[in-house]
Amino acid sequence: MRKIINIALITAIMLTAGCNQTPQETLTPITLGVTTADNAQLTEPPSVTETPTKPPTEPPTEPTPEPPTEITGTPLQQARALAARDTDSDGVDNSWALWLVNRRNPLPEGYVPELSPIAPSYDLDSRIAPYALLMMEAARNDGITLAVIWAYRDLPLQESNFRRQYNEYVNAGYTRERAFDLTAYGISIPGASEHNAGLAIDFNHIDESFDQHAAFRWLQDNAHEYGFIMRYPKDTIFITGIIYEPWHWRYLGVDMATRVKDSGLTFNEFYAIHIK
Ligand SMILES: [Zn+2]
């Protein structure tokens, strides 16, 4: 059954994780009542000889809600418009998270997300850290350990990881171009990694055999309920440009993760068809 993320629970977890952000602002209802101006009409008008006091304050104006924009255009344009206004069933707008981050779509230069811890020495974008914490707690309650082995990586770390692997291929006799491509299939080039965006977590084992573990099966069954998808499924390197990575889980928001999972498509395909 679909779980709805409980905002109160998220807040509690964020507080225990030392995070000060709340995922959603509380809306304060505007109370409409008799205003100062209305009251003034009920009392005696001031005598003309009296020194006029301050003019009555303007009554508070209620913000006019934006009328929903009509979705028009071709089916593709309509799909884009709908995706752009997508709001998760937990009330959080996750449209910001629908980034395609890869070699052809690198992050803006100098991009550094605001970070919150999800494990000792590991951070994630603050907006999604609570979901990762909730997911790991839910797994723990089911007897499953999800151990974070990578989360946010800054550019220097991404560069040193990439360079180390690249040098290994060069030393093994590959041309520089081939060594670059082979490296990029497994380690995204700096600035083109979902880890640089703080959007992805690697769990437990950097090894294809992770898909034989109970933790992987748990993620397959449940991760979308916390907004995460397996980003690089088996035999999709020709679409994603990245090898099979059962350990790499990327945040999209609860509703979008569910839609991508249900579609059976990679995020690249889903993005091309429904988002961009
Ligand atoms: Zn990863």
Image (tube, rainbow, N blue to C red):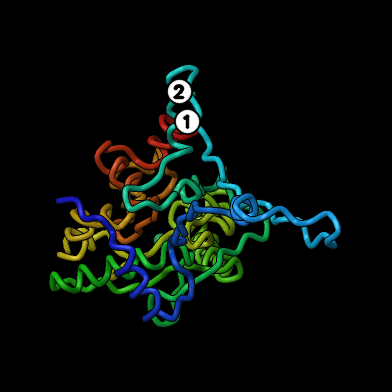
Q: Position of residue 33 (x, y in %)?
A: 50, 53
Determine whether the residue tagged by mark 2 lies in a helix, strand or loop: helix
Is 52 rendered above or below residue 272?
below
Depth order, front residue of 214/130: 130
Does dot 1 land on a helix, a strand or a loop? helix
Task: Give the camera-side residue of 213 and 123.
Answer: 123
On the rendered structure, is 141 left or right of 193? left
How many numbered circles does the render carry? 2
State if disc 2 and disc 1 touch (CB < 8 Å): yes
Q: Quadrant of residue 12?
A: bottom left
Going 46% across and 61% down the picture, which residue do you hit?
A: 25
Residue density around tag 1, few if under 14, some if 14–19, many if 20 or more, within 10 Å: some
Q: Which residue sits at x=53%, y=37%?
A: 66
Circle 1 sits on which residue?
Answer: 80
Q: Is residue 85 visible?
A: yes
Is 216 on the left or on the right of 190, as rendered?
left
Which residue: 49% across, 54% down?
Answer: 30
Q: Amino acid at mark 1?
A: Arg
